[in-house]
Amino acid sequence: MADEFIKGLTLSMVGALGWFIFAGWYRTPEYYAIEQLTAAAIEPNNVYQAIGIFAGDVSLWLMLLGALVYWVVIPALRETRRSVTESPN
Amino acid sequence: MTDQHTSTDPTGTDEQEPLTDGGTDGEARTDGGPPATIPPDDETPTWSERKERSQGLSRLTYEYFERARREDQDLRQESTYVERDVLGFPAWPHETIRNLAITSFFVGIIILVSATIPMYFENPANASSTPSIILPDWYLYWSFGLLKLNPINPGLAVLDGNLVFSHEFFGILGHGLIIGVIALVPFLNKGNARRPVEQPFWSAVGVMGALLSVTLAALAIQNFFPFELELLFTLVFILPFLGGVVTYAVLKTMREGYMYDLNKRYYRLRPPQ
């Protein structure tokens, strides 16, 4: 249980840090606007910017899905399997 | 170093005599000493437990703590103190290295963030022009939200529909109500619950208060929300109530569930009120 928690937390935090940095580069028009980190990405001028925007999306989904998989999906699967094997009606 | 391994043999035989089975040694040691005979007790690891800590992280952890315990034991025996009161790991190097690792991690995060997305400053504030939106610091938003309760300021028919209180005084009365309720809570609940599941009702009251502070803060920055004020105003009072109901239901359920099993011994000692 504790292992699953720290795995989910690690993936979530690594993803959050990456999303924070890449979205700060490509999805933040200015720091004095209300919408930061979630604005539409800039139009990439070169391949590095395209890679950065893509990495920001990957980090965002890593942050969300990492926690979801290890905190919800895997424990739910484990509970389901246990309830199936323990109650052979 | 020989004095570490002396035995308190009452027969007064040679101190270096190796102890055999049945030897009388007053100081029982687990590791490192001469072959001492220690009868297995509750703390003696079984063979499966020994096998579990024979590899990987468990072995590393076991060796670390065993080494630390041994160092502590040696320090005690070399020390002039008769007995130390506090059992623990020494500040150097154990605690210091751990704290250095944690400190390095957070300093690294600060440097990384400040290097990758440096903050820039806009033009300095113009002291001669008032901004269109005036807001206090964020932790006072709830108070500022209470000053915007004018949609529920009642008017009376006997006053020809005029307001009983001015909008400003109504906001001040709102503050009085909130602070009065907060001041009343310690007299209604002594707060001897150690965890929310013990007193679901008061936990629900607490969640309601916390949510109300957040929704009142949202009322203070009402022009940031992209829907009409009437809906926001309804949410300000509905959401804390809903949160309180959900909290009460969840805690009541948890009390019957695993939390109750987990704390059964604790509850047996001190039944929930």
Image (cartoon, coloured by chain):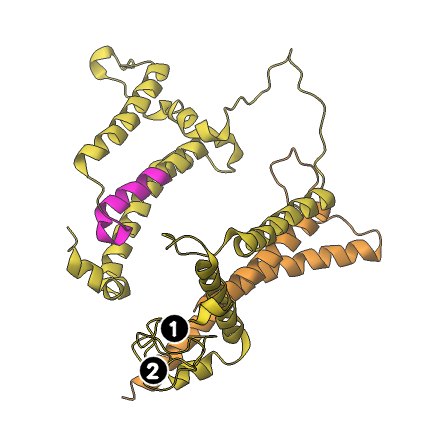
Chain under numbered label 2: B
| Image side of residue B267 versus residue A14, left or right | left
Q: Secondary structure at mark 2?
A: loop
Q: Chain of mark 1?
A: B
Q: Position of residue A39 (x, y in %)?
A: 65, 45
Give me the residue at 63% from left, 13% from top.
B129
Q: Is residue B146 left or right of residue B95?
A: left
Q: Is residue B212 above or below residue A8?
A: above
Q: How many C-alpha atoms fall within 10 Å of the one at disc 2: few (<14), some, or many (≥20)? A: some
Farthest residue to the bottom: give it. A88
Quarter where residue B25 is shown: bottom left
User: Which chain comes out orange in the rendered image?
Assistant: A
**Label at residue B23:** 2
Q: Which residue is mark 1?
A: B7
Residue B233 is marked as none
**In the image: residue A23, left or right of residue B220:** right
Chain letter for the yellow part: B
Magenta stretch: residue B169 in it? no
Secondary structure, magenta segment, majority class: helix
Q: Viewer-proximal residue, A79 or B40? A: B40
Left or right of residue B160, residue B221 in this image: right
Label located before the other in sequence (1 or 2): 1
Q: Residue at x 66, y 19 (%)?
A: B125
